[in-house]
Image (cartoon, rainbow, N blue to C red):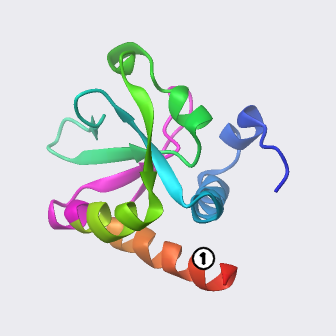
Amino acid sequence: MKEIDINEVLELPNIKKYELFIQLIVVNKGVYGLYNDGWAVQGDGNGNFFFPVWPTENFAQLMAIDNWQNYQPKYIALVDFYNVQLAQFESKNVKLSIFPTIKHNTLLIKPEVLKRDIEIALVKLN
């Protein structure tokens, strides 16, 4: 896979970022979140919560600012993310925030949709 230009990726439409996200997490066998004595979580003020995830450490590092300045990117193995965390998010009605940044809209995905898309990508890879 060719080297990724962060700025180019951030300018992609959300659906293209999502496709790239799926491709990268399957190839890299994991995702990144931000962690500091607990995971960074986003909310919309209406009681809805979103778990932000990125396909690479570099993308996660972009959001380690402001309220998350003391957070560090932390790798989550795909097998754990898929088997444990997605089920927890689904049971708690927490959506995934894909590629969130300060300047760009994020894509919110239900855990069951992300799980299905990971399954499809894994089948294609094998």
Asked whether 42 or 71 is in front, the reply is 71
For this view, does 63 lie left or right of residue 11?
left
Q: Residue at x 39, y 15 (%)?
A: 69
**How far across and how far down the image is residue 95, in percent?**
31, 56
x, y (%) of residue 108? 41, 54
Residue at left 51%, top 34%? 60
Give x and y (percent) for residue 88: 21, 62
Vertical side of 37 occupied by 108: above or below: below
Name which residue type carries label 1.
Ala
Is 92 inside the magenta-drawn segment?
yes
Magenta-drawn stretch contains 65: no
Please state if 59 lies on the left or on the right of 96 as rendered: right
Q: Which residue is mark 1?
A: 121
Residue 23 as seen in the image, left or right of residue 35: right
Figure quadrant of the N terminus: bottom right
**At which x and y percent is residue 56?**
59, 43
Which residue is found at the position 51% from the left and 39% from the top? 105
Q: Dot 1, crowdedness within 10 Å: few (<14), some or many (≥20)? A: some
The C terminus lies in which quarter of the figure? bottom right
Q: Is residue 84 above or below residue 71?
A: below
The boundaries of the magenta stretch are 88-110
Residue 56 drawn above or below residue 18: above
Which residue, as the protein is rendered here, is positioned at the far right? 2
Which is nearer the eye, 61 or 107? 61
Considering only vertical position in the picture, is 19 above or below 120? above
Instruction: Identify the residue at horizontal 71%, vertical 43% (top origin).
Output: 9
